[in-house]
Image (cartoon, rainbow, N blue to C red):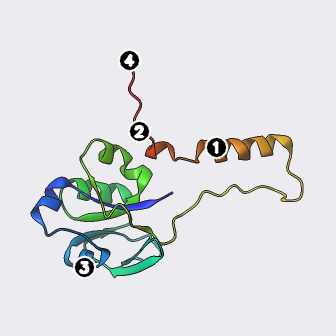
Amino acid sequence: MRRLLCASPAYLKAHRPIRHPRDLAHHACIGFTPMASHPVWHLSRRGEKQAVRTHARLATDDIDAVMHAALQDVGVAFCADWIAANELREGRLVAVLPTWNEEDDEVMHVIRASSQYTPAKMRAFLDWMAEKFAIAPWARPARKWR
């Protein structure tokens, strides 16, 4: 999973440009309180790290409220790529600082009973998962059906 910054086109048009993470200090941000570092957002790009203390115009533990607020021009959201995928694809949200990632992207874990013995079914499942999620489904281009 990758977290990314996004905002509505109207919000971005009405406010100063965001060219570097430190510019976020001058923007309304939408805080997601379950994030371990809230209200600080940790971003990185090719070894450069930046911690930004955000000024949340809205802070909530409800990701749907975060997305709704971003779509209503409230501010900049920092959310999982799969949460914002459709809105980004449809242009209702725009990626902000797309070359910057959350410093510690989250990963998917598979928990199994034993690491010493892996049944063939489990190995097949793990291999399938690795292939299936090499590129996250929500990051792939939308399919066009005929």
**Disc 2 from disc 3: Cα separation:** 32 Å
Disc 4: CA contacts within 10 A as few (<14), some (14-19) or many (>=20): few
Q: Sequence order check: which comes first, mark 4 or mark 3?
A: 3
> Circle 3 sits on which residue?
25
Residue 107 falls in image quadrant: bottom right
Q: Residue sitting at 26 percent across and 51 percent down?
A: 93
Residue 86 falls in image quadrant: top left
Q: Sequence order check: which comes first, mark 2 or mark 4?
A: 2
Q: Sequence order check: which comes first, mark 1 or mark 3?
A: 3
Helix, strand or loop status at disc 3: helix
Disc 2: CA contacts within 10 A as few (<14), some (14-19) or many (>=20): few
Q: Which residue is more in the foreground, 56 or 51?
A: 51
> Circle 1 sits on which residue?
131
**Disc 2 from disc 4: Cα separation:** 16 Å
| Residue type indicated by callout 2 | Pro
x and y, in percent, of residue 57 in the image: 22, 72
x and y, in percent, of residue 15 in the image: 13, 67
